[in-house]
């Protein structure tokens, strides 16, 4: 499996583990989850930062006073250009998020820069197998992550998450870099961009799917109610499917989905195609699912 996928899976599993343990983990827990995925112990710093930002307490770890990801980092001056960027975006950023963005961007600007010769020397050592320089290279390029993340603000993902994903992409890029992939900065920039874009795309697709389903369930409610009033009885599955211009299978799936998302009146009646006169056999929702010969119709005709 791709190393990035393995890393992200480990990170997700660790956060889930922390949530099940009152948002508390030990440094040994972290190292256990990332065994064989971390080349240099100094890289754990970025995982600790990620967890700290997600309100996870790490026993044995104290965030540095100048950690730009820490919630209690000192206040800094306000960069007005950041507010201007947020004002024209579709994503509404809270005052807390705007404060974090301003603080983080200024922290990045304050980080010492490596000279070209210094960075070239570190990259040579990295290529020679000295993974101890990884953390210095990553730290020197955190501002690059911030700049790329800045360009993706307002797309449905908060800035903190963009930074986190970008930092993970940077760390993995440094770990994976070889001479064969070409220019170092082009390589890490591409990996950071890919990591952030993937996060944005996942969120956008999730939002679209959720909204699409919500629209269909709302349509289901509307058509069911209108048909019931028109027919004077609970409609049958094929009648509902025809009215919604969908297949019976899709109508059935929507009805099952509505069971999880909508409250169903306990005395809801269910019919099947054999009851042409509209009379109901009076079975409950649970009985309908237990009887495969019945269409599992979960109506909300009498919903409040």
Image (cartoon, rainbow, N blue to C red):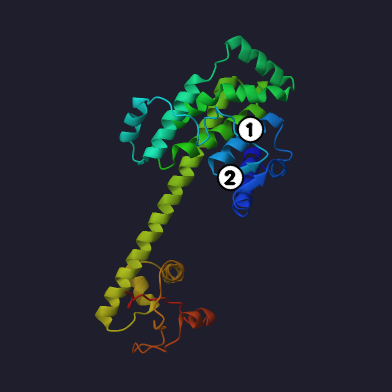
Q: Nearer the viewer, mark 2 or mark 1?
A: 2
The x and y percentages for residue 221 are 33, 69
Residue behind mark 2: 56
Q: Few, some or many C-alpha atoms within 10 Å of disc 1 (few <14, some 14-19, many ≥20)?
A: few
Local SS, label 2: loop
Q: Are discs 2 and 1 less than 8 Å apart at CB? A: no
Residue at 74% x, 19% y: name it: 128
Residue at 37% x, 38% y: name it: 95
Local SS, label 1: helix
Residue at 56% x, 31% y: name it: 191
Q: Quadrant of the N terminus?
A: top right
Q: Which mark is residue 226?
A: none
Rendered view: 297 above or below 170: below
Residue behind mark 1: 45
Q: Is residue 152 visible?
A: no
Question: Real-space Cα distance between discs 2 and 1?
Answer: 14 Å
Question: 254 or 103: which is nearer to us?
Answer: 103
Question: 255 or 161: which is nearer to us?
Answer: 161
Q: Few, some or many C-alpha atoms within 10 Å of disc 2 (few <14, some 14-19, many ≥20)?
A: some
């Amino acid at each position: 499996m791709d190393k990035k996928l393995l890393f992200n899976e480990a990170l997700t599993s660790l956060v889930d583990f922390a949530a099940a343990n009152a948002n508390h983990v030990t440094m040994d827990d972290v190292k256990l989850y990332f065994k064989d995925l971390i080349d240099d112990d100094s890289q754990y710093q970025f995982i600790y930062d990620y967890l700290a930002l997600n309100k996870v307490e790490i026993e044995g770890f104290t965030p540095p006073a100048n950690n730009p990801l820490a919630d209690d980092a000192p206040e800094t001056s306000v960069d007005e250009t950041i507010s201007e960027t947020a004002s024209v975006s579709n994503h509404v950023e809270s005052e807390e998020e705007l404060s974090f963005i301003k603080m983080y961007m200024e922290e990045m600007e304050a980080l010492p820069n490596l000279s070209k010769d210094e960075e070239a020397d570190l990259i040579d050592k990295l290529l020679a197998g000295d993974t101890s320089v990884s953390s210095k290279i990553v730290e020197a390029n955190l501002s690059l992550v911030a700049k790329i993340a800045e360009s993706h603000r307002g797309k449905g993902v908060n800035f903190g998450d963009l930074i986190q994903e970008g930092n993970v992409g940077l760390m993995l890029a440094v770990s994976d870099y070889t001479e064969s992939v070409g220019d170092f900065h082009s390589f890490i920039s591409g990996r950071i961009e890919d990591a952030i874009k993937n996060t944005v795309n996942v969120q956008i697709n999730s939002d679209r799917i959720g909204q699409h389903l919500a629209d269909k369930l709302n349509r289901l409610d509307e058509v069911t109610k209108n048909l019931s009033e028109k027919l004077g009885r609970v409609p049958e599955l094929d009648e509902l499917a025809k009215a919604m211009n969908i297949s019976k299978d899709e109508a059935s799936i929507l009805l099952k989905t509505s069971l999880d998302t909508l409250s169903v009146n306990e005395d809801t009646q269910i019919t099947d195609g054999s009851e042409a006169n509209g009379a109901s056999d009076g079975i409950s929702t649970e009985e309908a699912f237990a009887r495969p010969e019945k269409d599992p119709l979960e109506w909300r005709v009498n919903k409040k």
